[in-house]
Amino acid sequence: MGKIIGRYVLREVLTAWLAMMAVLLIVLTAYEVGAVLERAAASQFPQGVILRLIYLGLLQYVSLVAPLALLLGVIWAFGRLYHDSEMAAALACGVRPAVLYRPVIGLAVVVSAGLAAVTLMLAPTATHQALTLRDQAVRAGQFAPLEPGQFRAFGGGSAVVYAQQVEPDGTLGNVFIERTRGPVVEVAVANQARHTVSPDGKMQTIELYHGERFEGVPGSPEFRIMRFAEHTVPIPMPPANDVVTDLDAAPTAALYASADPRRQAKLQWRIALPLMCLVLTVVALPLSRLRPRQGRYARVWLALVIYVVYLNLLTAGEAWIGHGTIPVVLGLWWVHVVVILLALAISYGPTLAQRARYPLVRA
């Protein structure tokens, strides 16, 4: 009988966890699609890399979504069991709480092991690939030849170029350029122009011939109008992400071998996320216990508060380790202890306070 009830509880928790994972991933997918499309429009990404960038970005979010989904899944599943009096019936029939909690702990161990593989191996590789692919997409978009009759953004959106005609030799006809330099907006029109790229690929130049330039601050009545026979517009390339120095993309083995506090802080962060998943599951078991006539979703907001506090403490602890405020040896282990004590205080504090207040009733 115990095994049957254990499998039933495991199925309820697993179903709730998968449902919460699906909901959270859908929300994050919508956010990631918007962010990638915004960067793609600003830097003229090739269409073939957009879906891959979205996939790599979502892979980095899994380490944050899985603990929250498991926490809410346990609260959701056990909240229903308590609300429908199924837990009361099982305990009245002599089923021990360990029989009900053991499969949930097993699920948390499996999820934590998978999450450790993601945070320690897959996520750094995905970040490395995403940054490299993004840099290649930026350069491919910036160096692609201009198309006649289409507006084109350069320099990360700091300059917009339009050419009505584009000759095979690279000569542009009837050119319009808008460039932003702080509050000043510069607009230039010319009959002809030529687009060139420096040998090192860090600077693009558009040489305008026989045109006019308008310069001023939008909203101000003062504008300068100049006519020119030849005018050069330099457009620097946006800075590329260096995957070698980016800590999120650094391999875990390199972080472990380094004595740099910032790298050790990032290593502690990667280790803390799988432990966070296991701790939140243990915390959710007593937190999901409901009193009679209490709504099945009554503890969801407490779970969200604990998750937010947990995540903020981990973020603050990582920053403190990186700046040397706390020793590397202490790491982020203290955060898990603080969260467990907080959850115990929330779960059992009111009961203990009531017993201390009415000792005669307890006797």
Image (tube, helix red, strand yellow):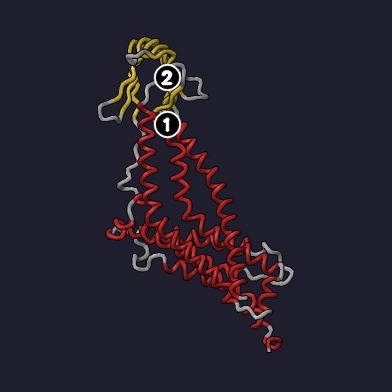
Q: Position of residue 335 (x, y in %)?
A: 46, 66
Marks 2 and 1 in Cβ contact (< 8 Å): no
Q: Is residue 214 above or below residue 14?
A: above
Q: Residues within 10 Å of mark 1 (few under 14, many from 20)?
A: some
N-term mark: 2 or 1: 1
* Picture coordinates of residue 315, whole percent (x, y): 45, 58
| Horizontal side of residue 300 vs 205, given as left or right | right
Task: Indicate the quadrant containing the N terminus: top left, top right, bottom left or bottom right.
Answer: bottom right
Position of the C terminus by quadrant? bottom right
Mark sitting on residue 209: none
For residue 359, say whether it is visible. Answer: yes
- Which residue corresponds to mark 1? 46
Disc count in the image? 2
> Which quadrant of the view contains residue 298?
bottom right
Residue 224 in view, yes or no: no
Could you tell me the amino acid type at mark 1?
Answer: Pro
Dot 2: element: loop
Q: Residue at x 37, y 22 (%)?
A: 145
Quarter where residue 99 is shown = bottom right
Secondary structure found at label 1:
loop
* Residue placed under numbered mark 2 in the picture: 147
In this view, which residue lies farthest toward the left? 199
Going by the numbered disc 2, the residue's amino acid type is: Glu
Answer left or right for 191 relative to 82: left
Q: Which residue shows up at 36% across the image and 13% down it?
A: 167
Question: Residue 339: x, y in percent?
Answer: 51, 68
User: Residue at the spot x=52%, y=72% of the render?
Assistant: 341
C-alpha distance separating marks 2 and 1: 14 Å
Residue located 42% across and 19% down the image: 147
Residue at the right extreme, as displayed: 293
> Residue 327: where, in percent of width, then height?
34, 66
